[in-house]
């Protein structure tokens, strides 16, 4: 047994040494590689060797290497992560197959698993999960030091199976357990409704591959009904595809205007997104509603239209998720999710960790709590559309008030020029 241990240890040191040489060669081609980095890698192999030979229990080399990689990426940011082969395969097929989920977009914030936004009509939404909730446990297992990929894997599962999450929220004295039943998450990203005074209301739930097409259909319907102004509701919209964020913004501005750009360390990570054509509605009065659950693509749209003086933003500061993750396949079937760039608005504002501050700040009413139970907030109807009575939705009320004043001013200007 001692002989086998020595052979295994020798093999591990050889593999680690080979890894150093391979890493050095690759890095020499891609980025400047400082000589003292080799010394750090030498120390790494020493620790690896000592752990493998002397730790109280025998540990598989793969477990040690994967753990080291996870620790390295965790030192970078909350969104870079390592995906073992099984997790990487799941990520590749999840957009094509049917899976059971809870209907929440999650991220890591302040080293805690945090809800970006619940999606209307899903198990999480119906249970009262809110943007900003901290998920501290899944099925009794602490999420401390858990990667985003690991958390997603635990939350997803077969349809109609239960999962219990422990949630900490502002106002809670201790975590509260929510038991949710997984369901197929099917989302129509655009919902619309005509409000009084010919004001069109459009809610974007997310930015999927058909969002711009669905938006165009809603706008055409409003045109037939002679819409006078528009409300674009991006509250609790966790984001999605960058190309769709650009296409949505394109609808409301003239061609050739900068919408968003990215900056990274390498030239090929720098990108600029421009409006391509004259938008279908470049002049109609527009208000955008945002809150702490508006993230990523939502912030790109809101930030661009605010910078271009095209829309008035109403609500509360957005989430602040504005980084680009590149998925890189690795040789053993695993994958690397690496932050490679950050998003900026046309005026140069960085979105990541900053968020977008509305032109008019209107706080959302706090949900009522009765005997420890949190009631749904009045501006979160399950349909995703506002009720006829919007008395509880202070942000939408302010939007309508603002648009009515803008429409009145437009009519006065038109009368003078006419």
Image: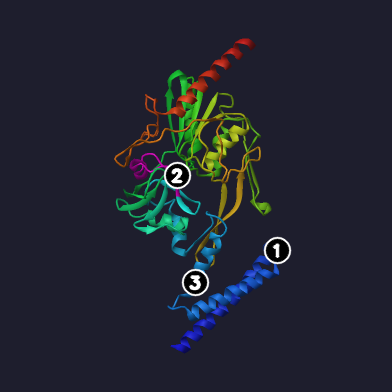
Disc 2 versus disc 3: distance between alpha carbons? 34 Å
Magenta region includes residue 247: no
Q: Which residue is mark 2?
A: 132
- As helix, strand or loop, the secondary structure at mark 3 comes to helix
Locate the N terminus and report the quarter of the image it occupies: bottom left
Q: Is residue 79 above or below residue 365?
A: below
Query: Looking at the image, how many numbered discs can be counted on the residues?
Result: 3
Q: Position of residue 45 (x, y in %)?
A: 58, 75
Q: Please tell me in which quadrant of the rendered image residue 374 appears.
A: top left
Residue at 43% x, 23% y is: 195
- As helix, strand or loop, the secondary structure at mark 1 comes to loop
Sequence-wise, which precedes: disc 2 or disc 3?
Answer: 3
Q: Is residue 228 visible?
A: no
Q: Position of residue 404 (x, y in %)?
A: 51, 19
- As helix, strand or loop, the secondary structure at mark 2 comes to loop
Q: Which residue is mark 3?
A: 64
Nearer-the-camera pick, 104 or 95: 104
- Write down the region rendered in magenta: 114-132
Horizontal side of 292 relative to 376 (left or right) equals right
Locate the C terminus and report the quarter of the image it occupies: top right
**Tag nearer the camera, 2 or 1:** 2
Label 2 with label 1: CB-CB less than 8 Å: no
Q: Please tell me in which quadrant of the rendered image residue 186 appears.
A: top left
Numbered label attached to residue 32: 1
Q: How is the image coloured?
A: rainbow
**Tag nearer the camera, 2 or 3:** 2
Q: Is residue 120 visible?
A: yes
């Amino acid at each position: 047994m001692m002989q086998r241990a020595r052979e295994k240890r020798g093999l591990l040191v050889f593999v680690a040494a080979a890894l150093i040489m391979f890493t050095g060669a690759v890095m020499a081609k891609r980025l400047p590689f400082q000589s003292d980095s080799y010394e750090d890698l030498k120390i790494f192999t020493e620790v690896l060797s000592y752990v493998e030979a002397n730790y109280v229990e025998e540990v598989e080399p793969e477990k040690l290497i994967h753990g080291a990689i996870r620790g390295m990426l965790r030192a970078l940011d909350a969104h870079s992560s390592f995906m073992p082969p099984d997790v990487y395969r799941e990520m590749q097929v999840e957009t094509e197959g049917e899976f059971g989920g809870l209907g929440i977009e999650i991220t890591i914030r302040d080293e805690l698993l945090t809800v970006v936004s619940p999606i209307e009509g899903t198990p999480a939404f119906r249970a009262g999960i809110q943007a900003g909730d901290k998920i501290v446990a899944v099925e009794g297992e602490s999420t401390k030091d858990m990667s985003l990929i690991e958390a997603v894997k635990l939350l997803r599962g077969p349809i109609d199976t239960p999962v219990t999450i422990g949630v900490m929220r502002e106002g809670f004295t201790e975590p509260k357990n929510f038991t949710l039943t997984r369901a197929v998450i099917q989302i129509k990203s655009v919902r619309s409704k005509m409000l009084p005074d010919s004001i069109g209301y459009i809610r974007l739930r997310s930015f999927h591959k058909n969002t711009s097409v669905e938006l165009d259909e809603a706008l055409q319907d409003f045109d037939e009904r002679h819409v006078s102004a528009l409300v674009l509701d991006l509250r609790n919209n966790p984001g999605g595809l960058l190309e769709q964020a650009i296409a949505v913004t394109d609808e409301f501005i003239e061609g050739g205007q900068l919408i968003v750009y990215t900056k990274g360390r390498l030239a090929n990570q720098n990108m600029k997104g421009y409006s391509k054509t004259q938008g279908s509605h470049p002049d109609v009065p527009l208000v955008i509603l945002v809150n702490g659950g508006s993230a990523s693509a939502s912030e790109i749209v809101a930030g661009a239209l605010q910078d271009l003086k095209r829309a008035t933003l109403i609500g509360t500061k957005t989430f602040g998720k504005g980084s680009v993750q590149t998925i890189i396949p690795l040789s053993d079937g695993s994958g690397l999710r690496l932050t490679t760039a950050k998003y900026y608005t046309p005026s140069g504002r960085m979105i990541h960790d900053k968020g977008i501050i509305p032109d008019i700040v209107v706080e959302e009413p706090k949900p009522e709590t009765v005997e420890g139970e949190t009631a749904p907030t009045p501006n979160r109807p399950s349909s995703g559309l506002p009720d006829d009575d919007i008395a509880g939705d202070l942000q939408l009320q302010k939007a309508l008030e603002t648009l009515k004043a803008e429409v009145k001013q437009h009519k006065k200007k038109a009368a003078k020029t006419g």
